[in-house]
Amino acid sequence: MKTGTYTLLEVLDDRDLEQFIIPEIQRDYVWGNAEVMDFVNSIKEGFENNDLPYLGFIYAYRSKDIAFKYFLVDGQQRMTTIFILLISLYKILKKEFPEYLITERRLKLDYKVRQATHDFLYEFVEFLNDNINKGIDINRNSIIEQNWYHLYYKNDITISNIIENFVGIYNWLSTFNDDGLTRFLRFLENDVKISYFDIEDGRQGEELYIYMNSRGRQLEVNETLKAKFLSKIDDDEKENWGKKWEDWQDFFWKNRLDNPDSDIGFNDFLRKIQIIFMCNNDYKEWEIHRFITNYEDINFDIFPNLSEIEKYFNSFKYLIENSTIKEFFAKYEKEHFLLNRYWSLINYFKILPILSFVSNVIEIDDQKVFRILRFLYNLSRKTNIGKDIKSQLIVAIKLMSQFGIENNQNYDVCDIAKYKTGRTTILDKEEVLKLELYNNPPTGLDRSTLENLFWEVEDNKIFDGEISLLLFDNIDEKNFSFNLENFVKSWNAFKVLFDDQSNYGLVSTALLFYGNTWNKETPHYYNNYNTQDWSWLVRNFKGKYLLQLLRDMYDKEFEEIEEITCDKFQNFFNENNFTCIDDLKKEDNFLMQFKILVIVDYFSERVVWSNGANIAEDNRYYWKNDPVFFNNQRVFYNVDRYVRDGRSGRILKKMRNILDDEDELNEIINRINNTNE
């Protein structure tokens, strides 16, 4: 039979095909009810929607010793299920089985995995055909009670699945009416298509590629790659690797999620392998980036061999099936993250380095692998990694490949610190310090407790992976001593301040009197500051002011920030000798004026932060109806974009009541300056 795409009837009734043989080396028929019903329902959907299903490729080679017999290398699960579906249809329609299913005591599909399997399948089909017009009950008991059924059959996986799936399909077909069954059979035989590939004929493979492409369907990457590999290996290896490839396809079929078939997942997996291969073989950064972002075709000439693919597959399968890793990605990304169809550079960073590492490990230690995964995932959140992701993805893959090769039996995430030379972006001071602390925890503290503490801080949406602010504030680098007690106090104080966003206005007010913690944002034609850019603050030198507030909040509840803030107000007034309204009005500095407004607002209506975190200054325009308080009045807005929200965010307008009330202002001034009140 020539390589090509055929209807099922054209394949099974081909004059050059006497039998498809499942050889001894092949695995059992392992599809269960879920896979089978998924498969037949996909065909039914095509039948009902007038959409011709395509069942993919089967691979086989012609027997050199027995004419017209083809050894099936790939497609066993699908072909067996198709065979069961066809005999079920003919049985329920009470039609004698056609010769393309059984003739001259030979089945079109013959199992040589075991003699028992071969014997059962023939006897079973004969039994059904001989009783085609008899009203026998179709269930498991009616089959196993036949005198040709031997007790030892019950231990044969293939036999058990054939029985269960036949009964399941037969019952499923019972929901059709007679006309629907007849039309469905014709549809299955004459419209459903499958591609056959003769793995010994490379020239016909090229013709098939042209044939498929001319009809708007290119060969899938995994199909082409498989044909290329199998055509170049010895016959005694074909069956072995064909079986393994089918196992891989079945894995991606079972894990296809919302995809119509296994091809998308399998192809994406093969792309991951090529990216790793290109990184480890010193391809240029632009070549790797172009392959990823342009979704270029896989280059078979540089693709690793079958043994390498098997190594990566086993590693990928482990990462997907390990319950701890599965739960981790479900929590931090989304369910089935590793089977994601759309991959950005940063997402590749989250998986390719750990895949590269695991593929080189001889013995898997779940806890140790998870620690490395956690380390790499956290790196993906760091600002400097994201800024240079094209380069750092390559660095990370090469690092973890080297680390895996050199530590394939005895490994620990802490040992990655030894590879910091030339990798200062990935292994910066923070990461190296954390790894060193894990390796030598403070006295009285076990490693797991320290890891969980640091991971909790890293997971905070403000720190988002970078905890240098708290870490280096509590480390004596000279003596390599870590103040665990103060680290925990700072972290607890941080949670008290930032766990509730409704408190951010009070936090902003307090921080204003520790130092300028504002981040200037665009546009640049006026001054616009984000006063609550906490993620920026914990990474900036201005974070030192936040540390001061955290220390003042040690072992305190949030409400106590009010007392701390009022003390800061008093110090501010004393330092600047503010004793009356005229003293306040003389200030012409933007930040000083704003501090005064914040204090006044704190003791009145608290409207300064009502429009969010941004404070803008634009003195090009002055609202003539707004109150004038300072002698040299600045114009303040509580908006993130003046051109959009300026009219609604005018702080002076919002504070009109208090700024026009001199008695109330004097009372506020006296209250601040009198410590006993």
Image (cartoon, helix red, strand yellow):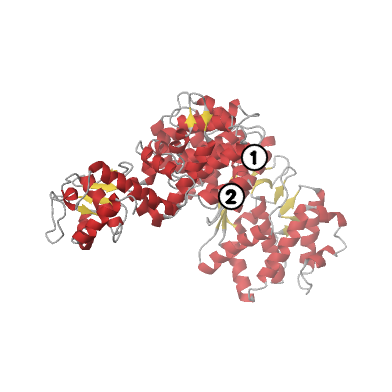
Q: Which of these two is toward me, 415 or 590? A: 590
Q: Position of residue 511 (x, y in %)?
A: 34, 46
Whether 450 is drawn above or below 651: the answer is above
Residue drawn at the location 14% of the way across and 58% of the way down: 623
Provide residue 600's location: percent of width, then percent of height: 26, 55
Q: Position of residue 204 (x, y in %)?
A: 54, 42
Residue 245 figure quarter: top right
Is 12 displayed left or right of 505 in the figure? right
In the image, 663 versus 110, the foreground residue is: 663
Point out the tag, 1 or 2, that comes first from the N-terminus: 2
Q: Is residue 662 visible?
A: yes
Q: Residues within 10 Å of mark 2 (few under 14, many from 20)?
A: some
Q: Is residue 105 in sight in this rendering? A: no
Q: Residue at x 34, y 51 (%)?
A: 676
- Residue 257 lies, in percent from the top left, at 55, 55
Horizontal placement of 118 versus 67: left or right?
right
Near mark 1 (Cα within 10 A), the count class, few <14, some 14-19 or many ≥20, is some
User: At numbered mark 2, what does the secondary structure look like: helix, strand or loop?
Assistant: helix
Observer-nearest of 380 and 117: 380
Taking depth in this image into account, of 656 and 346 the one nearest to the observer is: 656
In the rendered view, tell whether residue 549 sits above or below residue 37: above
Which residue shows up at 23% across the image and 45% down it? 591
Q: As shown in the figure, which amino acid type bears the numbered disc 2? A: Glu
Instruction: Give the residue pinned by disc 1.
Output: 366
Pointer 2 residue: 327
SS at mark 1 in the image: helix
Question: In which quadrant of the rendered image does the C terminus lie?
Answer: bottom left
How many numbered marks have been drawn onto this rendered protein structure?
Answer: 2
The residues tagged by marks 1 and 2 sit, at their Cα atoms, a distance apart of 13 Å
